[in-house]
Image (tube, grey):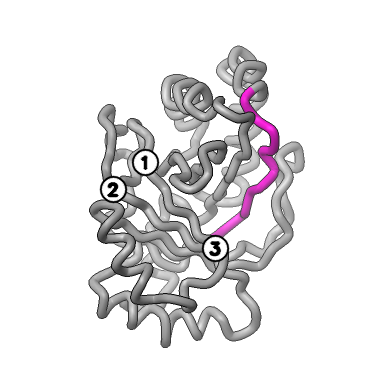
Amino acid sequence: MSWLAREVNQCCSVVDLRQYTLHPGRRDALIDLFDEHFVEGQEVCGMHIAGQFRDLDDPDRFVWLRGFHSLEARAEALKSFYYGPIWREHAEAANATMLDSDNALLLEPIHLGPDYPQPTAPHPTSPASSVIAGIVHPAADGFEDHFQHDLLPILTTLGVSPLAIFRTLPAENNFPALPLRDDTVLVWLARFADDAAYGVVRGELGPQWAGQELRLRPTERSQLR
């Protein structure tokens, strides 16, 4: 796989990766609300809701991804949604499930694989058994090269082709009502058929699987699955 910006689909040159810590036992309530009202409710405002997930290792964490054509489009889309009728109607119920919604990263894609969903892809309506691994690496100087030249070949040998690779987008938050983390990271996503397949690759990589490890199960309406 070439490490080229031109691989990136122009549908989403800007991506938010959001992790919510929820009140105990409230995750399914938020997912029901999100899948019913906030998928199309955000997409009609110009966003791409690529994936939403249950964290398999934290019953009170909800993780999701949304994309934008550009930074300027991000600001306009977020204003349209959060000051619009769908959020006004359901904000109280959604916020009642959350302890912390500020764990968010502003990213740009380095690579989007052919299985990364397009905005026009349908949103499913059935459960998924796949596991999406999301790894958030602190990206110190040289880490991007290390990932490309050392870690990526190991993944390829193990039969893993990343669905997407992102890095921190060094830009000012243009919708400050939603805070962002001030971290420099590299994030990659990969799909595994089931928990066993994930475990095999996890064991082979060992300590090279550094950073925050997210073992995720797609919700019923997640495109990314």
**Residue depicted at 47% across the width and 26% down the height:** 28
Quarter of the figure that contains the N terminus: bottom left
Q: Which label is found at residue 218?
A: 1
- Residue 16 is situated, as x and y percent measured from the top left of the image, at 56, 49
Residue 146 shown left or right of residue 177 in the figure: left
Q: SS class of the residue under badge 2?
A: loop
For the point 42% across and 20% down, the residue is 36
Q: Is residue 101 left or right of residue 48?
A: right
Q: Given the image, on which type of amino acid does mark 1 rest?
A: Pro
User: Disc 3 and disc 1: Cα gap in Å?
Assistant: 18 Å
Pick whichever, 107 or 188, lies toward us: 188
> Do tag 2 and tag 1 residues touch (Cβ < 8 Å)?
yes
- Which residue bears the numbered disc 2? 130
Magenta-colored stretch includes residue 179: no
* Count of numbered badges drawn on the protein: 3
**Dots 3, 1 in contact, CB < 8 A:** no
Residue 198 in the image: state x and y as whole percent.
32, 60
Graded by Cα atoms within 10 Å as few (under 14), some (14 to 19) or many (20 or more), the crowding at tag 1 reads many
How far across and down, in percent of the image, does residue 62 sit? 53, 39
Q: Is residue 103 magenta?
A: yes
| Residue occupied by mark 3 | 136
